[in-house]
Amino acid sequence: MTTTKHHLPEMVAAIDLGSNSFHMIVARLEENGTLSVIDRLRDSVRLGGGLDRNGNIDEAAQQRAFTCLETFSQRIRDLPHSAVRVAGTNTLRVAKNAQAFVDKAESILNHSIEVIEGREEARLIYLGVAHGLATKEGNRLVVDIGGGSTELIIGQSMLPMRRESMYTGCVSASRRFFADGYITRKTMKAAVTDASMILYSQASRFDSKKWDEAIGCAGTIKAIGNILHEQGWCESGISYKGLKQLRDVMIEAGHIDKLNLVGLSDNRRPVIAGGLSVLLGVFKTLKIKHMLVSDQGMREGLLYDLVGRITHTDVRDATVETVMSKWGVDEVQAGRVTDTVDILCKKACENSNIDADQQAPLLRWASMLHEIGLQVSHNNYHKHGSYLLTNADMQGFSRQEQALLAALVLSHRSKFRTAAFDKLMKPFVTPGKHMCILLRLAVLLQRGRADIELPDVDLKIDDNQIILRFPPDWLKHNSMTKASLRKEAEYLEAAGYTLNFA
């Protein structure tokens, strides 16, 4: 696949659209690939707190978010798209109007937004935390309590080995148990029990026998750590004893407005009771006695992952190799198709809507994975493959990227399903259809599954017109390919495209 070579960007940025707060970090990227942070911005947007009974983000929360993003955009508007990553987490995973929100937010930022799944969020959290710690032997448990979800990760050094995302967080717990601001022993006990029940299914996989030290990160845990330190209840980090002291003081106060705790900010006050209940549930369920606190988290993980992509150590490459191995993909045939896609993309990218740096690699990965459904059944294997890619846990890929891969695999043969592409995020719709045309032609040209030298072809995609030219008389001597192209022209015509070949 052709990609334009660039010098390393001078600046890179990452934005974490969390359920409670939005964070942005901007850093200088040195020539050796290291980062020097030069700016951090945070705003308590409480996006998750704006979810109404119908599962939509209400207008007030959206306005808070857009106001925040207007400020962020002033800092990153001149950065190239390849130097910025923006990721949305739990609220944008569950909100029914998430796509409309994302469309508006992208127009403000002038950068695309990835909605990432919980386990991918966990991977990025661990990556951020691990980069801020000294390398040492043993396993680490990393805990992140966000606004709508709690991530648990066990890793060693820089490698996350076990990841899980649970649907409870400081915003969701506060809305459910402390919406009126009152804190009683009964409601706190109910909230802790609820968190413990949610975490119980993972207790055996993450309990204290599986790790050597526990580390917490993100706003809730850092805020509680600050409170315990300021109150003199724990000299460093967070202890279970200190958490219970904080719980008792909050119950005695009776209401969040009456909390007089050094270290508790006004922005954190509305969700501190829910956050504490979740953290108590984590300590109780996983048998944690003491937890260190990290200043780094998901936004730093996003930044380090972005640098990996820029310097060609993209975790998505390893993920695709793992998926191919797991599903027994014919690597030789996948290689033939991928090499042909490379050739066709080089011919077509200059006059198509495909971005060579950001989108073309996704076409290459789809080419490598287009036959994974064969291990399920030969009949309709493209449908099985699409289902697997939609639902697989694929490290490094956003939800939208997986949807594009699934659409490409679904339509790489037989009927061209334009509706599958129309459902994608806007930057993928038209390019996705052009990518699919290239994949279909590559599969067609490699249908013989043999190592033969393909002719030098010319290819041009101009809106809905595809012009494919072979050397003189080549099609005359390759009647099977000619017949396949005639059939392909019919499929494409039904999808609104005209294939002209000679």
Image (cartoon, rainbow, N blue to C red):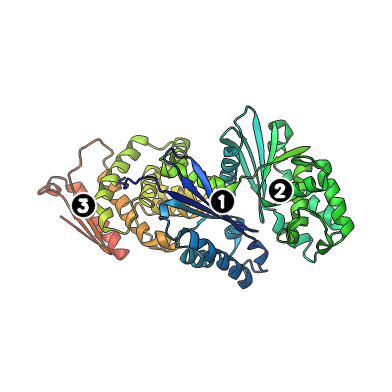
Nearest the eye: 405 or 388: 405
> Percent x, y for residue 324?
43, 38
Amino acid on which the number 1 mark rests in the picture: Glu
Q: Amino acid at mark 2?
A: Ile
Q: Residue drawn 82% across and 48% down?
A: 231
- The residue wearing badge 2 is 221
**Crowdedness of circle 1 by 10 Å Cα count: few (<14), some, many (20+)?**
many
Q: Nearer the viewer, mark 3 or mark 1?
A: 1
Q: Residue furthest right?
A: 252
- Residue denoted by label 1: 117
Q: Is residue 446 left or right of residue 371?
A: left
Q: Quadrant of the N terminus?
A: top left
Expressed as whole percent of the image width and height from the top left, the position of residue 290 reads 76, 38
The percent coordinates of residue 208 (x first, y second) are 73, 34
Left or right, 72 with reference to 497: right
Measure the C-alpha gap from mark 1 to mark 2: 22 Å
Secondary structure at badge 2 equals: helix
